[in-house]
Amino acid sequence: MSGDRILVVEDDPSVRTVLSELLERTGYRVETAADGAEALALAKNIPFQLHLIDYELPGMNGIDLMREIKRVHSHAVCILLTGFGTIELSVKAMKSGAFDFVSKPFQVDVVLGLLKNALEYHRLKHENLLLQKMVREKYQFENMVGQSPLMQGVYELIERVADSDSTILIQGESGTGKEVVAKTIHFNSPRRDKPLIPVNCGAIPEALLESELFGHEKGAFTGAVTSRIGRFELAHGGTLFLDEISELPLPLQVKLLRVLQERSFERVGGNKTIHVDVRIIAATNQDLEQAVDEKRFRKDLFYRLNVIPMMIPPLRERKEDVPLLIDHFIRRFNEKKQRKIQGVVPDAEKLLLEYPWPGNIRELENLIERLVTLKQEGLIQPSDLPDKLTKSHERRLLFQFELPEEGANFSELVSEFENQILQQALSKANGVKNRAAQLLKMNRTTLVEKLKRRWAHPTPSPADTGENLEPLPAANTD
């Protein structure tokens, strides 16, 4: 809360002083005004995060002042105070754009809790406006990286579904770019000027998730000293992105199903039905159909979410996109970190292409960021790459094999590979079994047993040449 500016507009000097001192002690920066004209002059020159406005003011009332402030700052957050609250006045205030309405005399903890919620709302709104401004161009189709046939299919589907309000289920491994796809859909849709609100269903504790999604009323549970709006209400008119939807607890799956069916819900602890206009995009790295079979995910909810299914391919299935992604990330981190990396030498690029990328695009992005940060300039060399990439390459070289047209005996193939591994280990260890066992990450007894079996029964070649494999090198009896 440190640094948040609040404008207190109150004609009663004693109330104005009490509120100002209370808020300053809490850590806010406070400006005060005794009437609408003074408040409006301040609001035009200072970017306040929150406006606390008394309804009964000389010259113009609080609702009229709030409207004037919103003409200057359309996204201004205002809370109205009044000494004679009525249902009609509260309805009028909310319709005029008030965040909330507080009757005097008020409790300190209620006001502070309400301010905290209002400032959180302001931050989310402000972040969303900045995000929209920053990503409007970033999430155009031409800025998505990847020209493989698999990704071309993804782009075509995004283009077809962006203009609709249909619910979308994005599936793919971790790190494949599911959130980027969701943002691209939103920022190419008619809802592009409205909020895109993300929720990671697996990152929020189960006890808090319902309140986070649907909000809560004052007194709904211990610590709920004020009402709070949830992510569904924040996303009104826009898109709600439910990431890791497979982690949603079963009781909340029922409530989400109702929202998808009726576009309405009640806050936790409330009985007022709230209607929302929200597009749902869900994502998961799990097999939801398997989760349905295992009774971990509701079948009816799966069908409601799976109106338009999208599969995002893993990076290992679109290797032709790896060089494009490497160039993209080098340019990005050169600019961000003021570096001068020119590119990747062919041998290093070969290693990057051969690596299976279990962490997908996120793993590649993190690696390029580390390389750009540490190297600073020049070309990325194989020696700059982590051991896991070079070792992965060595393992592939070790097991390079092409199955003959006529086929081969599986057991004999496995036996031959094992024989080659033992030969290499003993060779590198100069015949010392203890060292060979360490190289193969096995204990010495297991190694000795394998060697005894092979000395007793040499393995025939899978090519069936009639000749035994090369004898194993003599092993020291260390």
Image (tube, helix red, strand yellow):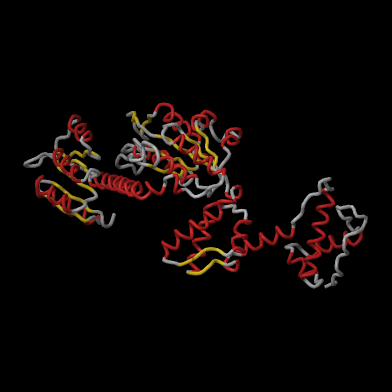
Query: Which is more toward the observer, 154 or 120?
Result: 154
Pick the quarter of the image with the N terminus.
bottom left
Q: Residue furthest top?
A: 262
Determine whether, in the image, residue 92 is placed left or right of residue 231.
left
Query: Which is more toward the observer, 220 or 158?
Result: 158
Which quadrant of the structure image shows residue 100? Answer: top left
Q: Position of residue 446 (x, y in %)?
A: 80, 61
Pick the quarter of the image with the C terminus.
bottom right
Q: Is residue 308 visible?
A: yes
Q: How many marks?
A: 0
Please, is residue 254 above or below residue 71 in the view? Answer: above
Query: Which is more toward the observer, 2 or 63?
Result: 63
Determine whether, in the image, residue 48 is placed left or right of residue 387.
left
Q: Residue furthest left?
A: 59
- The structure residue drawn at horizontal position 91% and vertical position 59%, both measured from the top left corner, is 468
Q: Position of residue 316 (x, y in %)?
A: 61, 50
Determine whether, in the image, residue 189 is placed left or right of residue 253.
left
Please, is residue 307 above or below residue 180 in the view? Answer: above
Q: Is residue 363 visible?
A: no
Which quadrant of the structure image shows residue 117? Answer: top left
- The structure residue drawn at horizontal position 45% and vertical position 47%, both measured from the top left corner, is 142
Q: Position of residue 30 (x, y in %)?
A: 19, 54
- The structure residue drawn at horizontal position 75% and vertical position 62%, both measured from the top left corner, is 442
Q: Position of residue 225 (x, y in %)?
A: 30, 42
Please, is residue 353 above or below residue 79 in the view? Answer: below
